[in-house]
Amino acid sequence: MNHTKLINGKSIDLGVCYYPEHWDPSLWPEDLDRMLEAGLKTVRIAEFAWSLIEPREGQYTYEFFDEFLALAQEKGIQVIFSTPTATPPAWLTKKYPETLNTDMEGHPIHHGARRHYNYNSPVYRRLCANIVEKSASHYAAHPAIVGWQLDNEFNCENSMFYSESDTLSFRSFLQAKYGSLDALNKAWGTVFWNQTYTEWEEIHVPRKTNSNSVNPHLMLDYFRFISDSVCSFAKMQAEIIRKYQKPGDFITTNGMFPHIDYQRLRRESLDVLMHDSYPNFAYCLDGFRADDRMKDRGSSRGLAEIRAVSAVFGIMEQQSGANGWNVSMEAPNPRPGQMTLWTMQSIAHGADYVSYFRWRTCTFGTEMYWHGILDYSGRENRRLWEVKEISRKISRIQELAGSLYEAEVGILKDYDNIWDAQTDKWHARVESASQDALFTALQQSHTPFDYVYLENHTTPESLLQYKLLFYPHACILTKERAELLEQYVAAGGKLILGCRTGYKDSYGRCVMDHLPGLVSGLSGTDIAEYSFVAPDEGKVAADWDGSRLEAAVFHDMLSLAGENAQVLARYTSGCYEGFPALIRNSFGNGEVYYFGGAFTPDTVKVFLNKLEIAEPYRNVIRLPESCELAVRKKEGKKYLFVLNYLAQPAKIILQVPVHDLWLGETLFGECDLEGYGTKVYCLS
């Protein structure tokens, strides 16, 4: 565990986002006093405040934040200071238009919102390095500062970059990767449609084409290039800050957005990654789905993603009010109890710091409908009272600070396949269906899980902490990853694979091997034919000893390939009726299950039940589907979080005595949990 002043394994803390530039300084003392009264001891500031430090190029004014930091120190408020590079000022974009991002046709993204820059403009990099240097050298020594946030939400709003600077940098990226145009042309299959390149200057970032289609292998490398751009931009800032930061101060950034390798970002630049959790997005009026049983519970999926990067993490922006920009997003206020529910949802998944967005609701600008704890008037309100109650509850669970989320099931991921699914519609359809199904089924069956990212340094030993791994659609497989999977299974692991496994190489090209390619021997499977499920076929099903499996979206026609393989299920409908749909193969001390379709929630539940993985805590606690169970563990103790996402009470049955940290007493047997209620039980 690190030795930072937050997220240090010693305490669970609350904070809030604050924008002193939005308010008359006469309001600051009262605001900070009220924050402390509510248990909010840390504020994040300055992420959009470049002009308050450099109002004109080369002119610096530090007085504004000097005044605020002095007040924060006086009041005993900790500060997370941000680099302001998410919103370059008007003087900058006017003088240096080459710093602006463009759309796919080369039209500039004009000044007036945020994130209008491109990462690869040499001018912008120089100016960003300068503002970070000036900010860090002046402010970093201040005793009120405990951490630094890089930029704000890398790749939020826009994760595609088409400026001339990006094209030039993309060429350099490709030259470093391939070395020669011959190697690039082979990797990209440019002989198709006469795309062969003879000079590097012929290569551009994706541009509009006649068919609205871009070479898919170029696109895969383009997404890798965007991630590389973000990571190098962040590293530049982090290296500057590290020259000046005090011992114990941390570096972070916030949110998870497309086309970024967050494992690399964390490794190179961050002490911890923080998340932005807005569960009420599920209730946006223009996208609400009444039949979605997950709704705000779906935010646990994002929390599991952040946990895969930082086992113990923070929330930089936790929902506290209604959502809405003046041009998009309309979501209601949290209902009574939901702020508590969502805060505990974050803590249940590993957050040891939760910062609410925001303290006061801004009275002007694009986010004047993005409400914070206080409304425009600043008067006492229900949400502030709930924050105070949350603070009191947090004081009762300090012992679990630094504890780790516990899971016996893992869902394997890698960035090659994530990015391939963002450019390949075939891959996207099966991946989307299966990821939704896995999350839903594991949540509803109260089976905690982790996302596990495969990297070059991943070891079989790190995978063996999981009794079961899903790798639903590893369309892109490399020899190294296939060998890692073999080592995991041979050592006793259980692996479940889905359709479309192993049919591409690392460039996104389809292989000419018998499918599933590099894992044919591991899975004991041969795939002679495959197809999308046709619209007139209805639902394609298979039977596994009386249990129904649905092959969503796609289905492979399977056959046995190996003496240790056996058929567990056959299709009972569809064009492959009678053919194997599920094959189990013994491999070393473990086993692999190859399922010929994408997954549905019910199909996942069949696997969990058949393999006796579902509900690992059923002998401790019984819950209805409406409740989430999350478990954190520390020093021989386990902390069971129960979260009720419905307005109606839920009935809990405690199978063994547990200590209720809210009530401070031991409970056993049947008890009720109120609507949107939460519980934390200690199991020694």
Image (cartoon, rainbow, N blue to C red):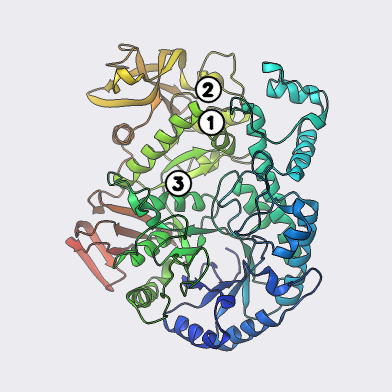
Tag 2: Cα neighbours inside 10 Å, few (<14), some, or many (≥20)?
many
Q: Quadrant of the C terminus?
A: bottom left
Picture coordinates of residue 185, whole percent (x, y): 74, 22
| Alpha-carbon span between mark 1 and mark 2 | 9 Å
Identify which amino acid the numbered label 3 is placed on: Asp
Contact flag, marks 3 and 2 (Cβ < 8 Å): no
| Disc 1 target residue | 485
Give the image quarter of residue 503.
top right
SS class of the residue under badge 1?
helix
Identify which amino acid the numbered label 2 is placed on: Val
Identify which amino acid the numbered label 1 is placed on: Leu
Q: Is residue 179 visible?
A: no
SS class of the residue under badge 3?
strand
292 or 97: which is nearer to us? 97
Tell which circle, 1 or 3, labels the residue nearer the N-terminal end: 3
Q: Quadrant of the N terminus?
A: bottom right
| Disc 3 target residue | 450
Q: Is residue 266 visible?
A: yes
Contact flag, marks 1 and 3 (Cβ < 8 Å): no
Viewed as shown, does residue 432 lie left or right of 204?
left
| Disc 2 target residue | 519
Indicate whether 651 appears above or below 209.
below
Indicate whether 524 appears above or below 121.
above
Contact flag, marks 1 and 2 (Cβ < 8 Å): yes
Residue at x 56%, y 83% (from the top left corner)? 24
Q: Residue 405 has which mark?
A: none
Residue at x 61%, y 69% (from the top left corner)? 3
